[in-house]
Image (cartoon, grey):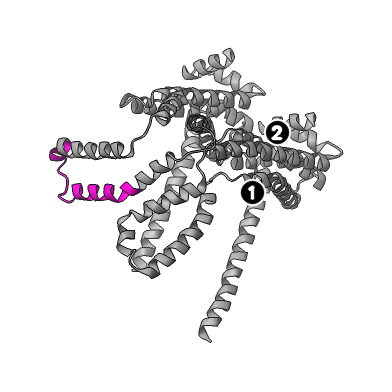
Amino acid sequence: MKELFQLGRDTLLFKHEAYVQHVARADALKRGLALLVLVTLIAGIASLVVNFAGGLRPTNVQAELREVEEGLQAFFDDAGPFLNLPPDFKKGVYQGFRVARPGIEMGMRIADLPTPLPKPVGIALSSLGKFLSLPFNRLAGWIGYGVWVLLAAKLLGGRATIAQTLGATAIYAVPHVLDILGPVPCLGGLLGLVATVWGIAIYVKALAVANEFGVGRATAATVLPALLFTALALLGMLVLFILSLALG
Amino acid sequence: MKTLIRLAWEALFLSEEPYAEMRDSPNAVPRGLGLVVLVALAVALVGLVGGTLEWATTPDMRDVQKVVLEGIKQMDWYKELQDNPEFREQFTQQFEMGWRIFPQLFGAPNLATAGLQIALLPLRLVLTWFLYGLVAHLFARLLGGQGGLGQTLGCTALAVAPQILNLATFFPYLVVGGVVGTWTILCRYVALKTCHRFRWGRALAATLLPYVALAVVVSLFACLGGVVGALIFGGGTTQ
């Protein structure tokens, strides 16, 4: 564990030797994954507590809906004059709320239905399940994008094996420990942005070290899949637009 | 058993050693089959525990159905149409039918389905392993691979290793998601690369071509089904 913390700290500080030693190890992927999972779980602790406490709080459907309605009213009273909203906007929002209201009431009544095990057990298990799903979400995103980066790196002359590349890039997750402050208004979002940029920089550095090539090619290998997806999405939209024009 | 578990664990981390060990094993196919069945049974049993806990912390679906029906009846659009007897009859029919399908689709816990997985999951994973192994071997040989069919099947059996992640479903409400599928492709790549001693480009082609072949076959069947359907129903309306 101490070794993992050391690796995490050196990674954050971009210590070149730490990257080289990590990639050279036979268990680089195991260590990278351990770090990714650990960081994600630490960052998710706050949301676990919030979810669990929120779940235990008794719900009063009518009071909560009234609260939402009062919040909307306060928003229009305070911000409305400055936002220059179209005249029908307020009416549309209230109409939308009125349409959604039975659905919200339905959801809350379902949440209040009895269950075979006591409610707090269900809330605890549900919060724990969501918390433990976090590393899997991160893993899915990282490996899903990583496959394309692997291909790009190989095409650009990279020498690393799959295990080395994935083991190296998994440490991109370390700055995301800052996500623990995610629920804090304003600061949480800002720190999330910092963690993302820092994480991308670590990703590029790790990819460069693993594949023994320069930062330029590592950046290209990291960015190329995203550019390709964007181009394909734009192309798809263009085709749809042309088709819609052609079909009237 | 212990050796199989060790091999699967190491194969999960994409190291070439376990795949090479399987390639050089004299009884790669029985070992591979044993591994696939073992992993599938473990995942299904653990899933049953998680599913039971989820069921025990979820309201009875009949109660949920009642609340949903009452909720819909409070909606403006329903109130506007409820005086029409034809609408009421159709709505009741469609609601009942939808209620038999949608809860399952949205993952409502079902003990019978979870229990059935103990038989179905090993069957599904064995079939998938065998079919993929067979087709991948064919492409690997066409691409100049040196491995035998038994070796290919043995090595690709290790690609079941990412299913180990599904053991986490012991915890109810946990979602493993798409990571298993992508990881399986990576394991299959390492398996074929090691088994046939390929360079990366050929290994990639041998890994992906079975998926391409599957997509082509599915598309062909879909087109064929479309044509047959058009002939049957089109012919029926013209007469």
| Residue A159: quarter of image | top right
Mark 2 closeness class: few <14, some 14–19, many ≥20 residues within 10 Å = many
Main secondary structure along the magenta-highlighted residues: helix
Estimate the x, y position of residue B75 in percent, counting from the top left: 32, 54
Left or right of B96 on screen, residue B34: right
Q: Looking at the picture, which amino acid does disc 2 mark? A: Ala
Residue found at the far right of this picture: B26
Task: Give me the disc on residue B208.
Answer: 1
Callout 2: helix, strand or loop? helix
Kindly check if marks 2 and 1 are in contact, taking CB atoms under 8 A apart as contact.
Answer: no
Estimate the x, y position of residue B23 in percent, counting from the top left: 80, 38
Task: Give me the disc on residue A208.
Answer: none
Q: Looking at the picture, which amino acid does disc 1 mark? A: Leu
Left or right of B124 on screen, residue A209: left
The chain containing the residue under callout 1 comes to B
Compared to A238, does B174 lie above or below?
above
Instruction: Tally the marks.
Output: 2
The answer to if A82 sits in the magenta stretch is yes
Estimate the x, y position of residue B233 in percent, counting from the top left: 55, 77
Given residues A132 and A57, the one toward you in this image is: A57
Compared to B85, does B96 lie above or below?
above
The CA span between labels 2 and 1 is 19 Å
Say which residue appears at 33% left-offset and 66% top-offset: B83
Given residues A136 and A7, the one toward you in this image is: A136
The answer to if A211 sits in the magenta stretch is no
Say which residue appears at 46% left-offset and 37% top-offset: A223
Estimate the x, y position of residue A237 in percent, counting from the top left: 39, 55
The residue tagged 2 is: B11
Which residues make up the magenta segment? A79-102
